[in-house]
Amino acid sequence: MSNVIIMMIGVSLLTFFIVLGAFLWAVKNKQFDDEYKFITLDDDEESLNDMLNLEKRKEEALRKQKKLS
């Protein structure tokens, strides 16, 4: 019985280190960086108005779609 527990602990540790290595590799290679949102971030008034208009059009399209359903 104790051999099974020791084997399970060993397999668990091996799996943990493999996952940890994959995570560290992904962080090192910038797999989690989202540079696009920082590049396109504009705070001028025209961009904010465009964003609001887009949101309004999306809401209107969703309402129309619900009415047709």
Image (tube, rainbow, N blue to C red):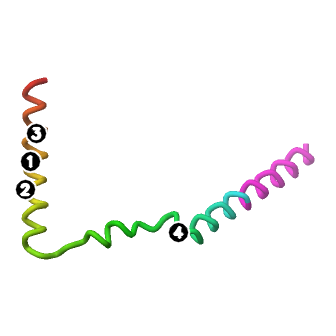
- Where residue 64 appears, as percent x and y from the top left, is 7, 33
State left or right for residue 38 relative to residue 8. left
Considering only order in the chain, which callout, 2 or 3, is on the residue closer to the N terminus?
2
Report the front residue among 62 and 17. Answer: 62
Q: Secondary structure at mark 4?
A: loop
Residue corresponding to mark 3:
61
Using the image, determine if residue 6 lies above or below residue 24: above
Q: Residue at x 49, y 64 (%)?
A: 32
Q: What mark, if any, has residue 57 been given in the picture? A: 1
The amino acid pointed to by label 1 is: Arg
- Where residue 30 appears, as percent x and y from the top left, is 52, 69
Q: Secondary structure at mark 2?
A: helix
The amino acid pointed to by label 2 is: Asn
Q: Residue at x 10, y 39 (%)?
A: 61
- Where residue 46 appears, as percent x and y from the top left, is 7, 70
Please report contact status of discs 3 and 2: CB closer than 8 Å, yes or no. Answer: no
> What span is colored magenta in the figure?
1-17
Give the Cα separation between the discs numbered 3 and 2.
Answer: 12 Å
The amino acid pointed to by label 3 is: Ala
